[in-house]
Amino acid sequence: MNWLHQIVFRLRAVLGKRKRDRVLDEELQTHLALLVEQNVARGMSLEAARREAKLSLGGADQIKESVHDHRGLPFLETFIQDLRFALRMLRKSPGFTAVAVLTLALGIGANTAIFSLINAVLLRTLPAAHPHELVLFSETPMGGANSGEQTGHWMFFSNDNYTYFRDHSESFKEMCAFQSGWTNLNLRLVGTSARPEVAHGRVVSGNFFSLLGLNPSAGRLFTSQDDQLGAPPTVVLSYLYWIRRFHQDSSVIGNPAEISGATYTIIGIAPPGFFDIKYDRTDLWIPLAFQPQVMSTESYANDPQEYWLNIMARLKPGVTLRKAQAVVNNQLKQILATQAHPETVQQIANSYITLAPGAYGISYIRITYEEAIQVLAGIVAIVLLIACANVANLLLSRSSARAQEISIRLSLGATRARLIRQLLTESILLAALGGAFGILGARWGVELLASMVTGSSSIVKSSVNARVLLFTAVVSLLAGILFGLVPALRSSRADLATQSKGSAGSRLRFGFANGLVVFQIAACLVLLIGAGLFLRTLQKLADQVLGFDEDHIVVARIDPWRAGYSPAQTPALYQALIDRAEAIPGVVSATVSYTEPLSGSSWTSNFSIEGAPSGSWRDRIVHKELVGPHYFETEGIPIILGRDIGPQDRPSGLLVTVINETMAKKFFPGANPIGRRFSLGAPFNDKEAMTIVGVAADARFYSLRDPVPPMEFCAAFTVPDDSSHSASYAQAVEVRVSGNPRGIATEIRTALSQVAANLPVTDVFLLDKRVGEALQQNRSAAELSSAFGTLALLLACIGIYGTMSYRVSRRTHEIGIRLALGAQPSDVLWLIARECLILLAVGIFFGVPIALASTKIIAAQLFGVRATDPWIFAGVAILLTLVALLACYIPARRAMKVDPMVALRYE
Amino acid sequence: MITAPKAEVLQGTLDLLVLKTLDTLGPLHGFGIARRIQQISEDALLLNQGTLYPALVRLEQRGWIRSKWGVSENNRRARYYSLTKAGRKHLTVEAQSWERMASIITRVLAGAEEA
């Protein structure tokens, strides 16, 4: 315990330093006096006694220093000393300090902002108990359902699947299931006169909350009792919804709420901070047993081939993810083998489930933007390195100004290690100041960043927390050491003083400074090429021919299914909407559709063609659309063969559909598809078969970059009466206008809202908004990479300017001689420019291979341009050359203007 | 006054001497300890008296001695150091190991001479 005693002793010494110093002083004086007395007693004269006493005792200061080393915390004391000195030095050169701190603030701040984003999006675990024990059965952001057979990667599961896995769960402590999508529901508190409002709801198994280990913030959460057939209907609200809709009124708990026609009791509120495992926007949860009422469909529990659930489970202690995955896949094969519908061996072999860690839930934002954020992190790291290189260069130039001070300190006995420590303290102080300003900047910048990357800034609210601050502190410390080490090592060399006199300068030191500039140029090259690639991708995507006329179409969203219309009532409703819209002046035509282009939803199905062999119908997939009369005319999509959907396509008429070019070419190659029939699903069903009456040109409904899939557009007015699936209703009214669509949008909204009192128009917007949304990610990639690339270029420019200025000032003597010996100013200009160009060439030489390797990382995000596009590489190289020449222009001019007489005298 | 060069005193032996002094003479101030050490060693040890003070701090840090204000024989205020129990124990242990070491060396040297 000796060392403990020592530490305590030293700490106490730090606190009582002054007092102990006084005590020691007194002690030494006493000792001295006693020595003098002793000497006098021996017969010396007073003066001789004093002298001998002093010699005998030794130097008081040396004693004090020696004692100091044993007391206190010498490391801490010298550190504080260094800090004070560093502050003084920084204050003495405010220009240098300002530039260095600003440079570092930009670099560190950018990294802090990106890390905040990473923290909010990628590192946020579910607020569940022991989140790292949770696993998901196939992590997928998709929500929806598959009917019929499933093969390949199983993402959804049926009620039977869930029961089987739960009953045979040897690897899991507990398992729960939840609806993979969500449902929009009307909620109204019973007993109030308030209008029903829309909420996002999800059905979940009874043990959903208990598996996650959550506690209610009010009331109670589900138990398995609530999830039985015949149990009283219950609903749990989310915390945010409770605040937003009911203003945290605790009296709603225990009260009934009317949700889409049925009454449920509100039993409790979920804890704050829990936004659901998937999608983050659920307002309320209802037990699985009530799925038919909530989703307005038949009971999925009775259909072994309706796959619509996601499953989450908690691993038993000691079971690894891989082991559990193997077990689960075995179980899947057993399920398939013993199913009522016999599966082929091939299908059983192809089906698989992947278990993914569930700690982070399924965040749509995370899955979509994970890669983009990682690329951004790489970019800002490079920007920080460039900034550090700049500051290192600044420090190097400053070191020669301090050469005298340092050589004095060395000659007074300072060790080199001590000097290095002090210089490093200065560097770290600079970095800390830069980091502090960087945090301030990041707080403002991160919201802007988030909305650029993900479209909304809500995820990063209050995101500058302890972890982010710690990150900034560590980055600042590392940056300080990184840019400060080499200058500190060089500055503390004993022969510095002799070097600084010579005008030729040390080749070695310039070698390092040059190396920094070369690094900056190479790094800039990489960043700018990346930015160039993103810009070109954006341009190529934006130039894509969409196939429809997005500039003249206004979309109005409606929801007749939720408003309670039966399929039989829809034709009249649609016609009323169309007529009302077409009555507005400026409107050319109007129609209805299931959804507008680029809306993000899609409805796919297998299909069987009449007369064609039924084999491999699994590969026959078509994207379905439901459209009203004159759809293609309204959208501006040309009809290639046959006709548009028209007013003759009435209910109880022929089921007709128009297919797109891709579908015609793929499934009716070389033949005329007009008149042919096909039905959805397999095998061919004559009653539900649709007749092809037209072929339309391809248009981009789903993605700007993926190839157009086969599509069929069946007439909305002829939907059979018994299909009450929500997808058989039109959810959009699309209106084509002749002039500027912006002016008419509000008129359209008002007009359509008046058509039916119970059918609200939820949203009205121009179709090009959807196009903008589809481009949004690419746009932000291009904008951000350009912004950071420009920042890097600016920093490199400053770096080149600084280095060249310094070089010129060191070579003034030599330039003077050259001028005196008859050199022209233009020769001097060339001399300086040549140096600059050599640096540039070396930088590009190293930068190009690095760029080639780096752009492979983003190759997947590019479109229409190769990752090694030579035009962009060449263009960036030329840009860098121009910027470098610009940067050295002023120093070069200064060199030209050197007065030989003055230069020759300068030494 | 020119004195013959004296042997340097190692840190550890200085500590031991201080402890022994305090053990023998009881609580003593810095000057007294220094004088006593010079006396014992008959001036054979080079002792810049100032080097005593870092040693005293070190010993106090290790908990082997403690210090407090007192009054000296001629009514001066001085800081007195005294041995703690742990210090006494350390002294015993160290003294034994020194003696053992000394006897081994003596025997080795005697053996070398005999051989």
Image (cartoon, coloured by chain):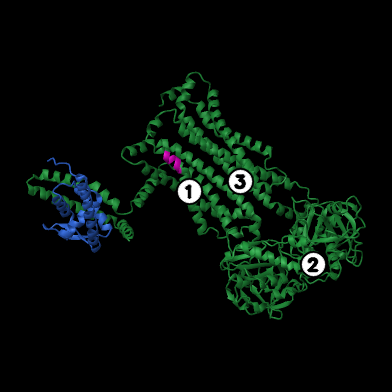
Chain colours: A green, B blue
Principal secondary structure, stretch drawn in magenta: helix
Distance from Cα at disc 1 to Cα at disc 3: 25 Å
The label on residue A342 is 2
Task: Indicate the chain on which mark 3 is placed.
Answer: A
Query: Which of label 1 and label 3 is nearer to you?
Result: 1
- The residue tagged with tag 1: helix, strand or loop? helix
The magenta stretch is A484-489
Which of these two is toward me, A173 or A793? A173
> Which of labels 2 and 3 is toward the front?
2
Along the horizontal axis of the image, is A852 left or right of A700? Answer: left
Residue pointed to by mark 3: A787
Residue A342 percent location from the top left of the image: 79, 67
Q: Magenta includes A485?
A: yes
The CA span between labels 2 and 3 is: 58 Å
Relative to A671, is A506 on the left or the right?
left
Whole-percent x, y for residue A341 in the image: 80, 68
Q: From the image, which quarter does the C terminus of chain A lie in?
A: top left
Toward the front, the furthest residue is B115
Q: Name the residue under label 1.
A: A478
Label 3, secondary structure: give it. Answer: helix
